[in-house]
Amino acid sequence: MVSKVIYDRNTYLTRVIRGLSTGNLIEVIGMRGVGKTAFLKLLSTKLEISQKYLPIFLETLPSYDVFDTFRKRIRQIALICLPKSKLAGMLNDRSGELREEDLAILVREVEKSLGKKIVVIIDDVHECKRKEVRNFITFCIRNGLKVITASLKGFFARSVKIVLKPLSKEAVRKMILDFLGYNLEQETISKIYSLTGGIPSYLLIMLQKLGVWSLKHRTRINSGIVEKIFSTEISGGLIRNLVKDYLRSYVSIFGPKTIELLVKEPTEIGIDKTSQPLLKKLKRLGLIDMENKKIVVVEPVLRKYIETIRAEEMNIGVHQLPVMRSIKRNRKFKKVFSHFTIVGENLRLFSRDILIEIAPSPSIELLNQLVKIRRILNAKDAVLICPNREYDNAFYEHIKKLGIRILTLGEETRQKFYDKGIEVANRVILEHSAMQQNL
């Protein structure tokens, strides 16, 4: 498989390595799929070859404890390079973890023994708990360590920020040549570049599919074939699954407002002051831009996915990750919750020909949306579950006119409202199933 960072990345490598000589914290920022992880691994190799730095690469997962992992890595290194040191007794004592004071001493001894500067590399730092990673990086900076992180957005004010962009058209051409073993026509290369935007993760999928097609049909690839394969992938293939996963990540990191800015038609959105910070972050990632005072999605695969969804007249529902902790602790509740889709602050379910919306703050606009979704899904019934509040007559008249059932719950905290709403939703589905069996 072709590496996705050996192309068009030397400039970024030079900038990062130079940044290490002048600063202690560098943040590599980039959209999903642009190759941040692969870039960091290549960077780690370059630093190790230089004999000047000792890179320690830390991969992250949700709720990942970077401090604990760093302790273990330093302990392992110290046991190798400091076997007869005065610290050996402390290292071999596994009854307790290293205190910060001892860890700082250990770091200095390792650097002194190896004659290298430790560089801590943390991938996907947005997956870590913010407070914990801040404490860890503060410890590193205080003890003179260099830190390089990769994420979807910047977390630290005093850092050197480097935004990793997609591959250039020339880099895409070289990648295609290495992968397929022969040159394509300029028109075909331009088509691949325009469809994928030079984003390595999409490029790899397209090149794999094109390679298989070429071997199977024993013919050269042209722009028409590229268009056909891409349309298949964005409609129901690997690229569609990938872009949906990326969209979930953006919602998880930047919040539900991201859906409004990315998914809705540009003419539907009023750009208020509260959206300005988010707009800047998404624009810096290269996801959106402003044209004639309207928001336009410029990431081509995401834009095509959204256009495909609109063409299919489907409502976009994106699971916001991670799922709320209170839901995770209750196994039975989690099982039920997995069938729901998070749409803004609402929970939506379509099961057994019934459309159910659990909405803490319903509106006339939501009612009209439910009618449209019910028609698209050909649902036999639509049920709105909402708090027992005093809604005006116009609201109830509109519900009655649209033929939507409304079930109200007592005023509770937001979490308890969701809990009870899901119980009621499942009861409605069971009652509907029982009625169908009797018929």
Image (cartoon, helix red, strand yellow):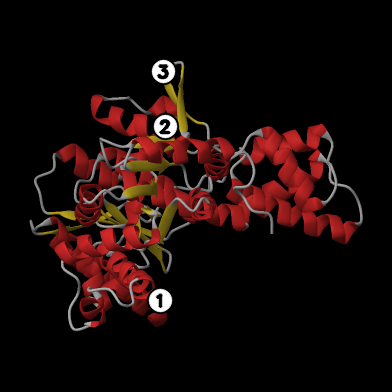
The residue located at (49%, 55%) in the rendering is: 48
Query: Is residue 232 at all visible to an observer of this figure?
Result: no
How far across and down, in percent of the image, does residue 95 sit?
18, 84
Q: CA distance from mark 3 to mark 2?
A: 17 Å
Marks 1, 3: nearer the viewer: 3
Image disc number at residue 219: none
Marks 2, 1: nearer the viewer: 2
Identity, as a three-letter code, of the amino acid under mark 1: Gln
Residue underneath mark 1: 436
In contact (CB < 8 Å): disc 1 and disc 3: no
How far across and down, in percent of the image, does residue 27 sit?
37, 42
Identity, as a three-letter code, of the amino acid under mark 2: Arg
**Total number of numbered discs in the rendering:** 3
> Quadrant of the image for the N terminus?
bottom right
Identity, as a three-letter code, of the amino acid under mark 3: Lys
Residue underneath mark 3: 293
Q: CA distance from mark 2 to mark 1?
A: 53 Å
Which sits earlier in the primary sequence, circle 1 or circle 3?
Answer: 3
**Residue 26 image-quadrant placement:** top left
Residue underneath mark 2: 284
**Numbered disc 3: secondary structure:** loop
Q: Label 3 crowding class (10 Å Cα cut-off): few <14, some 14-19, many 20+? A: few
How far across and down, in percent of the image, does residue 422 sit?
25, 66
> Quadrant of the image for the C terminus?
bottom left
Would residue 134 appear left or right of 343 to someone viewing this image?
A: left
The residue located at (15%, 62%) in the rendering is: 101
The residue located at (84%, 42%) in the rendering is: 183
Which sits earlier in the primary sequence, circle 3 or circle 2?
Answer: 2
Q: Looking at this view, is 126 or 362 the one in front? A: 126
